[in-house]
Image (spheres, rainbow, N blue to C red):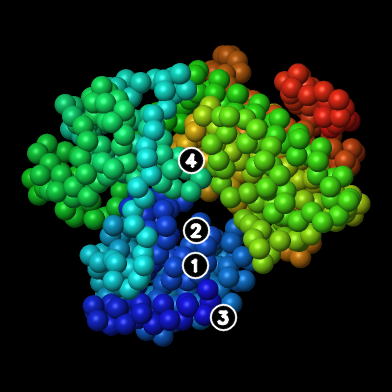
Amino acid sequence: MENMIPQRLDMMRSYMSAHGFDAFIVVSSDPHSSEYVAECWKSREWLSGFDGSAGTVVVTAGEALLWTDSRYWLAAEKSLAGTGIGLMKDGAPETPTITAWLCENLKEGDVVGVDGKVCSIAEVKAWSEEFSSCGIKVDASTDPFAEIWEGRPQVPTGKAFMLPVEYSGESAASKISRLRAEFERLGVDGMLVTMLDEIAWLTNLRGNDVEYNPVVVSYMIVTAETATLYVNKEKLTLEVESYLAGEGISIADYDSIWSALESYDKETLLMQPNRCNRAAVECMNNACYAVFKESPLAMMKAVKNETEIAGFETAMLSEGIAMVKLLNWLKPAVAAGGVHELDVDAKLTEFRAEDDSFKGLSFATISAYGENAAIVHYEPNEKENALLAPEGFLLLDCGGQYLGGTTDITRTIALGELTREQKEDYTRVLRGHISLAMAKFPKGTCGTQLDVLARQWLWQSCDNYLHGTGHGVGHFLNVHEGPHQIRMNNMPAHLLPGMTVTNEPGLYKAGRHGIRIENTMIVKEYGESEFGTFFELSPLTLCPIDTTPIIPELLGDDARAYINDYHVIVYGKLSPYFSGELLEFLAKACAPI
């Protein structure tokens, strides 16, 4: 791959020269602001060779640089070696922002290009404002990869399918009606829906257009009178077409969204500034006024109904059964020899596939042994596929898509002898996980206010982790969903009953080891007092947490009681599905400490 990158950079620079660009910013997104994108929109990966889910490449006549966050610094260094692309550690104190670097390296009157179809309204606006102080212009009118990427894949054509109400808990017609009620509150006549998971949730359609996310590439315009899905019709069976018609949803071709925006005849149209692509607002009817507000669908989707919650419980049960089988197999197999990181992923997928409701992975499995686990988003491959030995830690971060829900779990597993440092680090990470899991908090609390609970035991030793502590999880949808998160930077969305959220503190020491422990939780009501309503986090994930690395005196009595109580729940729910050796293993794994 790296041998091709310099050639591709040359093609990019030739395109820039021919079209009057002095720099070009290549983002990682698609027209729908997706985290995982279809092959046809992996332009940044094609240009740079770096396949992490987050990163931005900047190309000038003389330099090419990749900005990416701390999750990918180690992986990016390896990926970019020999490509002619330098790494900019986004978020590090010494690293300038993209705009600051370009203002320093370009001159007044220069032009920076971006593709308005894959950059959000807010991104282009922010760049334009920041560059204006340097006299630099932004041009968002062109996609260079339409010309230079020979053999570029086509927009996906996989078939869409319906998620029955027995799984979704609410009809599409009902959801659309609720959305229209939000229009009245927000004072708009309609909404352009661009996020693929929001469209999937609103229509109760699922698909296979994007790896790991069961979504359908499409747009939607909803008004008080109409709801139109813009999708390539070859993706729809006659059954799906009939279903959509019955829910009051019309169908139009995917590419006709641009002409639909030009002819939109209402006064106002809601667009999400951080999610809607810039090209959409550029081609709107001049008589229409774009209202830039956050999508009401995000909160509607985040609060799960009773059917969805029951589905999550079923999915977590299925995941727990597969995980126990994997854990029972793992240590004896490692001791026997010949087990590599990829073998763990394959074996877990084999166990999951025994359940008919399993539809695939919810993200690429992180099976990271030893020092590889210090690379936060490490993914083994044929070239990097460590042999496991009966010592040290294996970090296994994995998730599945089930008809009932989406799973996300991380376990750090002691394969044998550990150092004192490894045990201390594991115990402190676990104590942070438990401190957050035990939280009781008043209505109106956001995830940022809880984040310190998970970090406090690490901070006491001047340790930290640079990723978020928790994110929402979709219902047979994207494994990462908002608007709520648990992280250090301000995330103002309140935590509400029915929201799923992960609890995943970690610690990563380069060249030594990485530790993360994660359960998916659900927000529930806890109680009432003169100070109002209080909520709590209840675990959905059902899987033993390795207790062998724990240093009991560092854990504390409350945390010890919590882990014992959690294991009582895990054993009680999973034990009816096992017998013999597996039941004995589960009992030992859930034994009190």
Q: Residues within 10 Å of mark 4 (few under 14, many from 20)?
A: many
Q: Residue at x 46, y 51 (%)?
A: 36
**Residue 570 in the figure: left or right of residue 254:** right
| Label at residue 54 | 2
**Residue 385 in the figure: left or right of residue 241:** right
Horizontal and vertical percent position of residue 494 = 48, 32
Amino acid type of the residue tagged 2 in the rendering: Ala
Amino acid type of the residue tagged 3 in the rendering: Gly
Give the CA distance from mark 4 to mark 1: 24 Å
Dots 2, 3 in contact, CB < 8 A? no
Q: Is residue 317 above or below residue 469?
A: above
Horizontal and vertical percent position of residue 331 = 85, 45
Q: Is residue 186 above or below residue 54?
A: above
Q: Residue at x 28, y 71 (%)?
A: 147
The mark closer to the camera, 1 or 3, is: 3
Q: To which residue does mark 3 refer?
A: 82
Label 3 or label 4, whichever comes before in sequence order: 3
Residue extending furthest toward the front: 238
Q: Is residue 317 above or below residue 71?
A: above
Q: To which residue does mark 1 refer?
A: 67
Q: To which residue does mark 4 refer?
A: 478
Dots 1, 3 in contact, CB < 8 A? no
Foreground residue, 439 or 224? 224
Label 1 or label 3, whichever comes before in sequence order: 1
Dots 4, 2 in contact, CB < 8 A? no
